[in-house]
Image (cartoon, grey):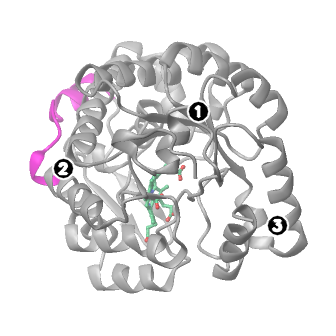
Amino acid sequence: MKRLGEGKSGQRIVSQALDGHVPDRTPIWMMRQAGRYLPEYRAVREKAGDFLTLCYTPDHAVEVTLQPIRRFGFDAAILFSDILVVPHALGCDLSFEAGEGPRLSTVTNLAELNALRDELDASKIDRVLEAVGRIRQELPEETTLLGFCGAPWTVATYMIAGRGTPDQAPARLASLRDPAFFTALIDRLVQTSARYLIGQLKAGADAVQIFDSWAGVLDPEAFRLWSIEPITRIVQAVRAEVPDARIIAFPKGATLQGLTELVRVSGVNAVGLDWTAERPATRLALGGKVALQGNLDPLTLIAGGGALDRAIDALMQDFHGAAHIFNLGHGIRPETPIAHVEQMIARVRG
Ligand code: CP3
């Protein structure tokens, strides 16, 4: 293969694409690639007992991060953790009830925010950073290691509501009713998330992804204020300490207008696209500026068969010759057949 992106990244083709090169073959990894669709994940999850123990026990976190790499040979591994580790390490109570998703103690005003920590609790975060270092050591040389955090907006929606919500109304209302509180919450998340990402990069992550899963509910002005601005401040703070940091933003549900502005303002290396993205228009607007990551509909992966083949072919065609990292448009669902993942990888790799 062409030796693009030499040096720090060596043959890591995900890193090459993030550096703006077009690798010889399209790199592939999957959001939520370590998860319940894998029997080996379910076994470790069972042994750990609960999800947070899994996240905070380096032996377990290392093992489940490596499982999809061993099984499928993906071009990137993503640290096994969760975006809600940040509020947890700020002092929020957090639990994951089976089949119900996350539950947090709520933060709804300045007094409650001020009762939290200013910085992440090292006794929690250091265990995650230990896992990062060990994963990097155990990964194949050519596999990129991704760290991550949630974007301030998305994390704030969980902190304010104490759980996932259909339309993020509690956080949207808080931003309108109590801007002083809401701004302070976003600021706290900008600062602590930046420190967290710096820690991950220094521990061995080759790149980091910022998940703004609920960006799609924001109107254009709110998208600027609560998605683009905080992400930009994180990018700046991270690059002040790690100047060559590779950063992917995934503002799920963003419009092309929003994505374009995010790319222009923030200086990220790549954007993640959900499955609703208009690929040709997105490539035209952003293809020369950043790497494009995505965007297979996770339901297509459940369907499999000819529908899956056709969707992959169209996607590969649209991004042929671009700095493209193949991925899903959102996380893989637990009911996805493993055979369909194998079919996808074989097709992408030709
Ligand atoms: O991608 C990976 O493989 C790395 C691990 C990872 C997890 N969560 C593991 C996880 C990552 C990157 C995340 C990010 C995350 N967590 C996001 C942003 C991405 C997205 O999906 O939009 C969000 C919004 C969360 C919050 C969260 N964590 C929810 C809503 C849930 C419950 C829903 C569910 O799928 O059960 C979680 C739990 C969670 N995080 C699981 C996993 C594998 C399932 C826990 C289990 O094993 O029971």
Q: Secondary structure at mark 1?
A: helix
What crowding class fits label 2: few (fewer than 14 Cα within 10 Å), some (14-19), or many (20 or more)?
some
Labels 1 and 2 touching (C-beta < 8 A): no
Q: At 76% from the left edge and 29% from the top edge, which residue is drawn? A: 282
Identify the residue position indicated by label 2 in the image: 125
The span from disc 1 to disc 2 (Cα, nearest Å) is 26 Å
Residue 272: horizontal and vertical position, in percent?
A: 60, 40
Lateral position of residue 107 relative to residue 33, left or right: left
Q: At 21% from the left edge and 56% from the top edge, which residue is drawn? A: 133
Q: At 67% from the left edge and 50% from the top edge, which residue is drawn? A: 329
Location of residue 257 (image quadrant): top right
**Which residues, given as a range, are shown in magenta?**
109-124
Labels 2 and 3 touching (C-beta < 8 A): no
Residue 100: horizontal and vertical position, in percent?
A: 49, 66
Which residue type carries mark 3? Leu
Q: Earlier in the sequence, mark 1 or mark 2?
A: 2
